[in-house]
Amino acid sequence: MKNKQLQDDPDLTQTDGIGHVFDEMSDRYTDVMDSMVPHYRKLSKSMLGLLPESFNPEKVLDLGCGNGNVSMLSTTLYPHAHHHLVDASEEMIQLCKKRFSGTPMTYDQNFFQSLQLSPNTYDLVLAGFSLHHLTAGEKELFFANLCPAMTAKGIFACADLFLNKESAEHEQFLVDWKTFVINSGKSNADWNWLFDHYGKYDIPSTYSDHRNWLIKAGFNRVELSWNDGFWGCLHAYKA
Ligand SMILES: C[S@@+](CC[C@H](N)C(=O)[O-])C[C@H]1O[C@@H](n2cnc3c(N)ncnc32)[C@H](O)[C@@H]1O
């Protein structure tokens, strides 16, 4: 197993450790998502499929690209757009470089918190199940940095778990989530692995918090475009 010492070191901050956590699961990533994230494919498709028909982005930013599942949907829909892929995990970036070897794209192995985004650059920004790795304060700050980096017609699409761990609904959410994982054919040991990962690395926030931070950052309109319970897809429009 790669970077075992890093994964086991409890002193690592989430920011330093998260790239290595995803390095380790990169080879089985899509199977993990399909079996452990309810509506993974539906939500990924909703980010792209629910965009306005007339929308035709020239520059797309994929935040936390993972192994490229979201960018694959985006390059299919917008083959002429330039795609810029960001991820903290070196292994994930390498997988994307192989997967998109024939497609001109740019890559940045970097943390969201360290990105220097040029103003007025991106028409479409995609974040599939990646921003829940930021704390609430980091998300708010990140949206404030993101909004000026988007063009006037810019749209931000985000699929994620929209729930606060402190909420009254959280306990029942965990029961339902475990049922989904077990019904997907995973074992109790798999659930225990996921529960441990969720406890260590995931800091989800409510849709309402996302909406407030995005409006404060300068987006004109925010919509929860599709959801089933706390699993959802939002679109934020600058215009
Ligand atoms: C659950 S995966 C989602 C991947 C892909 N967007 C998808 O929907 O399949 C989260 C990805 O975000 C990356 N990530 C998590 N926190 C990050 C951070 N602070 N900065 C950059 N990338 C981060 C991880 O390395 C991982 O590849």
Image (cartoon, rainbow, N blue to C red):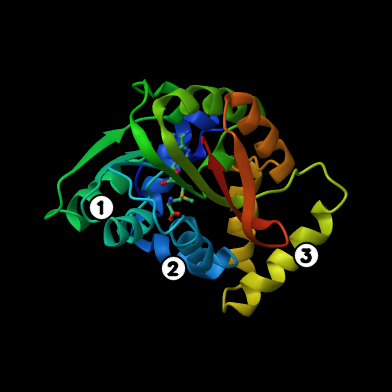
Point out the tag, 1 or 2, that comes first from the N-terminus.
Answer: 2
Above or below residue 85? Residue 103 is below
Front residue (pair 21, 29): 29
Point out the tag, 3 or 2, that comes first from the N-terminus.
Answer: 2
Q: Residues within 10 Å of mark 1 (few under 14, many from 20)?
A: some
Total marks shown come to 3
Residue 47: % across, % down: 48, 56
Mark 3 vs mark 2, CA separation in Å:
21 Å
Q: Residue at x 35, y 30 (%)?
A: 110
Q: Residues within 10 Å of mark 3 (few under 14, many from 20)?
A: few
Q: Name the residue tied to disc 3.
A: 175
Q: Residues within 10 Å of mark 2 (few under 14, many from 20)?
A: few
Q: Secondary structure at mark 2?
A: helix
Q: Amino acid type of disc 1?
A: Leu
Q: Amino acid type of disc 3?
A: Val
Q: Is mark 3 within 8 Å of ligand 1?
A: no
Q: Secondary structure at mark 1?
A: helix
Q: Amino acid type of disc 2?
A: Asp
Front residue (pair 179, 112): 112
Q: Name the residue tied to disc 2.
A: 31
Report if residue 197 is visible in the image. Answer: yes
Q: Is residue 29 left or right of residue 72?
A: right
Q: Secondary structure at mark 3?
A: helix
Report if residue 63 is visible in the image. Answer: no
Q: Which mark is residue 27?
A: none
Q: Is mark 1 within 8 Å of ligand 1?
A: no
Residue 105: % across, % down: 20, 44
Ligand 1 - quadrant of the structure image: top left
Q: Name the residue tied to disc 1.
A: 95
Residue 179: % across, % down: 71, 72
Q: Residue at x 58, y 42 (%)?
A: 132
